[in-house]
């Protein structure tokens, strides 16, 4: 079989119905548009989303989208299981060493250590934030936790 021999299955195609060409042609008089009204007129097309003058859904919903907090600080999370895989016993874990180990995308955002995964190595961790469970795992394995002070890290100044 060749490409020029391909045909659609029998009955799959239909001829276009020619409208407004007389009643004997099957689409005369109103040509499928019904009687009067906006949609029966020539050139009639209501724009997408128009609801007859009622405030459209798309414009009603735009007022219900919350807000962006301009003071939000986005932390880069690092789990204790990743520290276990990438660092040796007694290693210093800093944002720079995490970046070189491939655990951080960049050094612009602060780092938070989270407690997913096991940790059995004693590590000296320096981070901007540490969850309580992660601190317990690190100190339970014989390591230490040091918080890095930055502008907006209130807990580092308290301890």
Image (cartoon, rainbow, N blue to C red):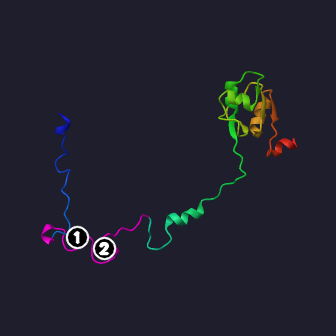
Q: Residue 113 got which mark?
A: none
Taking depth in this image into account, of 68 and 116 the one nearest to the observer is 68
Q: Residue at 17% across / 51% down in the picture? A: 11
Observer able to see residue 47: yes
Query: In the structure shown, which secondary structural element does the residue marked by tag 1 occupy?
Result: loop
- Please indicate whether residue 46 sits to the left or right of residue 126 in the image: left
Q: Separation of disc 1 and disc 2 at Cα?
A: 11 Å
In the shown orientation, is residue 52 left or right of residue 18?
A: right
Taking the view exactly as shown, the residue that stands out farthest to the left is 24
Which percent across, then down, holds residue 109? 71, 40
Q: Is residue 24 above or below residue 106?
A: below
- Disc 1 crowd rating (10 Å Cα; few below 14, some 14-19, many 20+) is some
Is residue 33 within the magenta segment?
yes
Main secondary structure along the magenta-highlighted residues = loop
Q: Quadrant of the C terminus?
A: top right
**Which residue is drawn at the image coordinates 76% and 23% (left, top)?**
91
Q: Which residues are magenta?
A: 22-48
Q: Vertically, is 109 above or below 65?
A: above
Residue 131 lies in what quarter of the image? top right
Q: Is residue 88 above or below residue 151?
A: above
Q: In the rendered image, which quarter is residue 8 located in?
A: top left
Residue receiving disc 2: 41
């Amino acid at each position: 079989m060749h490409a020029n021999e391909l045909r659609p299955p029998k009955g799959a195609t239909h001829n276009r119905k020619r409208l407004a060409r007389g009643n004997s042609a099957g689409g005369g008089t109103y040509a499928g548009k019904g009687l009067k009204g906006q949609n029966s007129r020539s050139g009639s097309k209501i724009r997408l989303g128009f609801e007859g003058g009622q405030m459209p859904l798309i414009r009603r919903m735009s007022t219900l989208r919350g807000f962006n907090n301009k003071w939000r600080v986005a932390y880069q999370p690092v789990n204790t299981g990743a520290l276990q895989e990438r660092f040796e016993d007694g290693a210093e874990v800093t944002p720079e060493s995490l970046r070189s180990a491939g655990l951080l995308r960049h050094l612009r955002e602060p780092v938070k250590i989270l407690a997913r995964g096991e940790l059995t190595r004693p590590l000296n961790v320096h981070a901007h934030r540490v969850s309580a469970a992660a601190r317990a795992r690190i100190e339970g394995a014989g390591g230490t936790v040091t918080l890095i002070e930055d502008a907006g890290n209130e807990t580092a100044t308290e301890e």
